[in-house]
Image (cartoon, rainbow, N blue to C red):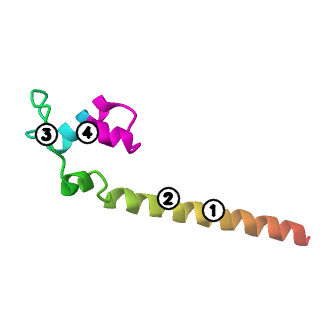
Amino acid sequence: MSIPLVALGLSSDTKFIEMICRSIQPDRFSSKEKDGFLTIKDFMKVFNKDHFADKLLNALLKVVESKRQVVTHKQFRSEER
């Protein structure tokens, strides 16, 4: 199951894919079973949005933009003199 994902370029290591699959569905991808299957719904769980991280990133971007505007304003004022 992990070899097609490596072939797609989603990972360079089959062990990493097996570890990810076990974290998604531990009962289906136990270390004993080698023939687990991954559905599209299971695969999409990896790419769910992290709303907390999005809010944090947006807050940081606002701070950076406001500081950038202050610096730009100061540079503009110093060039006027």
Q: Assign a secondary structure to mark 4.
A: helix
Q: Residue 70: x percent and y percent?
A: 68, 66
- Earlier sequence position, callout 2 versus callout 1: 2
Q: Is residue 53 magenta?
A: no
Name the mark on residue 36. 3
Q: Furthest-bottom residue in view?
A: 80
Front label number (3 vs 2): 3
Q: Quadrant of residue 21?
A: top left
Say which residue appears at 53% left-offset and 65% top-offset. Answer: 62
Circle 3 — which element? loop
Residue occupying the point 31% across, 31% down: 14
Measured in 3D between alpha carbons, the distance from the residue under mark 2 to the one under mark 1, in whole angstroms, is 11 Å
- How far, Cα to Cα, is label 1 from label 4? 39 Å
Give the residues in magenta. 1-17
Q: Considering only order in the chain, which callout, 4 or 1, is on the residue closer to the N terminus?
A: 4
Neighbour tally class for label 4: few under 14, some 14-19, many 20 plus, Cα within 10 Å: some
Of circles 4 and 3, the one toward us is 3
Q: Which residue is mark 1?
A: 67
Place of residue 17 in the rendered image (x, y in percent of width and height, measured from the top left): 28, 36
Q: Residue at x 41, y 58 (%)?
A: 56
Quarter of the N terminus within the rendering: top left
**Is 35 drawn above or below residue 64 in the view shown?**
above
Disc 1 residue type (three-letter): Lys
